[in-house]
């Protein structure tokens, strides 16, 4: 037997002092009657079945309470098997890990803020497979598509700007790596969430987006930062200040917003700009991906479903109460001889 609401079983402990109280009250009532009437009058005037009835009524009340508590605990025994179809969307998150993501115009920095938001998204997903691609001057599949969100979190926590030594922002390469992460035989339910703060350094982002469209993949792009740009902290050990070019000028990373907008538009996705770090991936997922990307059967599994039996406990409790209140009441008096 299993119980769906085990916490209600603790109420059974209350019944123990209740039983003790009923036993005490029964003995006390019997003693008071004998003291008031005396032994001779008690035996002549009081039908002994009255005290016996009181005892039985108490027992029936106790059992009724026990059965009601068991009913609240949702007892289950016996089971059957059900085939459950899990539907969802295949989502690959392509995350920019270039050194420009260390810019602190968004606290604590752009990369850490993006990772926090991805974590929030993982916490609300149900039934969607998620993969993870990291990119800078090139791109790599860090986590293949999976329903195991805990594994995705492990890979996500391991991502930093030192993961890919090739400098730059190869958005086109990241798109192609992301598309290749999907099942080649199934072109349904494909979405890429592209999170980047930089401009495309390879010049093939638009061509890669067209290639993604041919493979039935929608791109949902999130641009971090602003058009003015932000300085990039020098990632070298012991270095301070910001990265500079050969002329000694501070390098500013600028968002190539028109390119990201065009990529999202031509694939049927959406573009979101994040200046303050409020990416709101949950809103992007609920209002865009869920509506624009068709769900498909991700997984079918058999689940053992226990049969609810609380109705039997209610029936037993009602039976106890029915017996208690429908039993014939014995006469209070005997005839005096």
Image: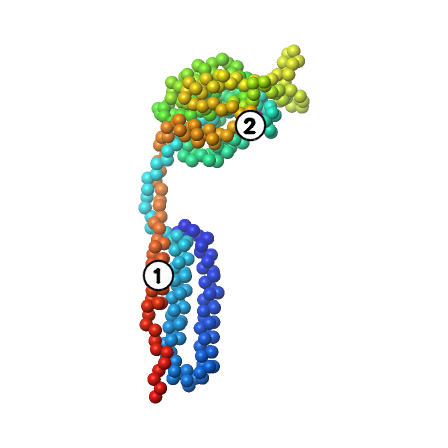
Instruction: Give the mark nearest the N terminus, 1 or 2.
Output: 2
Residue occupying the point 56% across, 21% down: 226
Crowd around label 1: few <14 · some 14–19 · many ≥20 (10 Å) = some
Residue occupying the point 45% across, 26% down: 92
Asked whether residue 204 appears in the rendered view, the answer is yes
Helix, strand or loop status at disc 2: loop
What stretch of residues is rendered in magenta? 110-115
Does residue 112 belong to the magenta stretch?
yes
Crowd around label 2: few <14 · some 14–19 · many ≥20 (10 Å) = many
Q: Position of residue 113 (x, y in %)?
A: 56, 29
Residue 318's label in the rendered image is: 1
Residue 13 drawn above or below residue 171 = below
Q: Which of 69 and 237 lies nearest the eye of the viewer?
A: 69
Q: Position of residue 260 (x, y in %)?
A: 48, 19
Residue 20's label in the rendered image is: none
Asked whether residue 166 appears in the rendered view, the answer is no
Residue 305 drawn above or below residue 183 = below
Residue occupying the point 38% across, 21% down: 216
The residue pinned by badge 2 equals 277
Q: Position of residue 321 (x, y in %)?
A: 36, 64
Residue occupying the point 62% across, 20% down: 231
């Amino acid at each position: 037997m299993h119980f769906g609401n085990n916490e209600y079983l603790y109420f059974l402990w209350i019944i123990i002092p209740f039983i003790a109280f009923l036993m005490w009250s029964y003995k006390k009532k019997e003693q008071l009657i004998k003291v008031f009437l005396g032994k001779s009058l008690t035996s002549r005037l009081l039908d002994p079945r009255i005290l016996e009835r009181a005892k039985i009524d108490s027992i029936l009340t106790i059992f009724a309470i026990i059965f009601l508590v068991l009913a609240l605990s949702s007892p289950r025994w016996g089971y059957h098997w059900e085939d459950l179809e899990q539907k969802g969307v295949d989502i690959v998150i392509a995350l920019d890990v270039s050194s420009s993501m260390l810019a602190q115009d968004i606290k604590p920095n752009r990369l850490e803020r993006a990772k926090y938001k991805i974590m929030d998204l993982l916490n609300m997903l149900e039934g969607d497979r998620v993969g993870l691609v990291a990119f800078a001057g090139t791109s790599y599949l860090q986590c293949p598509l999976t329903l195991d969100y805990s594994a995705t979190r492990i890979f996500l926590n391991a991502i930093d700007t030192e993961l890919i030594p090739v400098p730059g922002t190869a958005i086109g390469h990241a798109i192609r790596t992301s598309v290749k992460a999907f099942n080649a035989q199934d072109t349904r339910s494909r979405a890429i969430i592209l999170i980047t703060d930089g401009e495309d350094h390879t010049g093939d982002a638009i061509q890669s987006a067209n290639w993604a469209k041919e493979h039935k993949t929608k791109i949902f792009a999130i641009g971090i930062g602003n058009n003015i740009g932000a300085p990039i902290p020098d990632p070298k050990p012991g270095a301070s200040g910001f990265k500079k070019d050969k002329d000694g000028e501070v390098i500013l990373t600028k968002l190539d917003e028109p390119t990201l907008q065009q990529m999202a538009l031509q694939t049927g996705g959406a573009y979101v700009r994040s200046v303050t770090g409020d990416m709101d991936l949950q809103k992007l997922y609920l209002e865009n991906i869920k509506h624009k990307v068709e769900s498909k059967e991700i997984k079918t599994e058999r689940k053992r479903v226990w049969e609810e039996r609380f109705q039997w406990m209610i029936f037993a409790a009602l039976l106890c109460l029915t017996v208690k209140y429908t039993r014939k009441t014995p006469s209070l008096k005997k005839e005096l001889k």
